[in-house]
Amino acid sequence: MSRPDVALITPYPDAGRHSGRSGVASYSANLAEALAVTVEQIGELAAGNIPARELRRAKEHVKGRVLLAMESTSARMHRLGDALASDSEILSLDRVAAELDAVDVEAVAELATLLLAPERLSAAGIGPSEERFLAALEPGTPAVARAA
């Protein structure tokens, strides 16, 4: 079975919101498969089934994004303003990199179990058929389908 492209998890940690996005149209025959893959991957995260290579790549990706963002004056000012507004410590880039490097599989699994628990999931779809979207949700996430 070929897997559809699934881009997972865009964090907004200050708001407690995380989202996943799939590049599959709601009318596509691949919709149910895309949703099943997403639910499967969430389960893998929570179970701690994260290859060391993938964790290393993810950490390097985040570090790269943070460092590149710091090349923008406005991004630096937003970072400082966010820290001041939330009365949190302004971390040096070296400290941010060190804290990212310290993340291990167990920490990711613990957080995924807490934040991505099935009862906390929700789904939204845009397209011509609500019934098709709900039918695609049902096999992997019946609770989400009932709540939708």
Image (cartoon, rainbow, N blue to C red):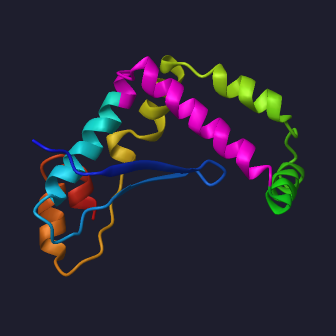
Please tell me in which quadrant of the rendered image residue 145 appears. bottom left
Q: Position of residue 28 (x, y in %)?
A: 15, 67
Q: Position of residue 117 (x, y in %)?
A: 38, 38
Q: Is residue 69 above or below residue 115?
A: below
Q: Is residue 138 above or below residue 74?
A: above
Q: Position of residue 136 (x, y in %)?
A: 14, 59
Q: Is residue 65 visible?
A: yes
Residue at the image position 48 percent from the left and 19 percent from the top: 105
Q: Nearer the viewer, residue 114 or 34?
A: 34
Please check the rendered image and state whether residue 68 is part of the magenta-colored stretch, yes or no. yes
Residue at the image position 38 percent from the left and 30 percent from the top: 45
Highlighted range, magenta: 45-71
Q: Main secondary structure of the magenta part?
A: helix
Viewed as shown, does residue 56 lie left or right of 22? right
Which quadrant is the N terminus positioned in?
top left
Please tell me in which quadrant of the rendered image residue 41 appears. top left
Q: Is residue 141 visible?
A: no
Residue at the image position 27 percent from the left and 54 percent from the top: 144
Please check the rendered image and state whether residue 101 is part of the magenta-colored stretch, yes or no. no
Please tell me in which quadrant of the rendered image residue 15 appears. bottom right
Residue at the image position 23 percent from the left and 69 percent from the top: 25
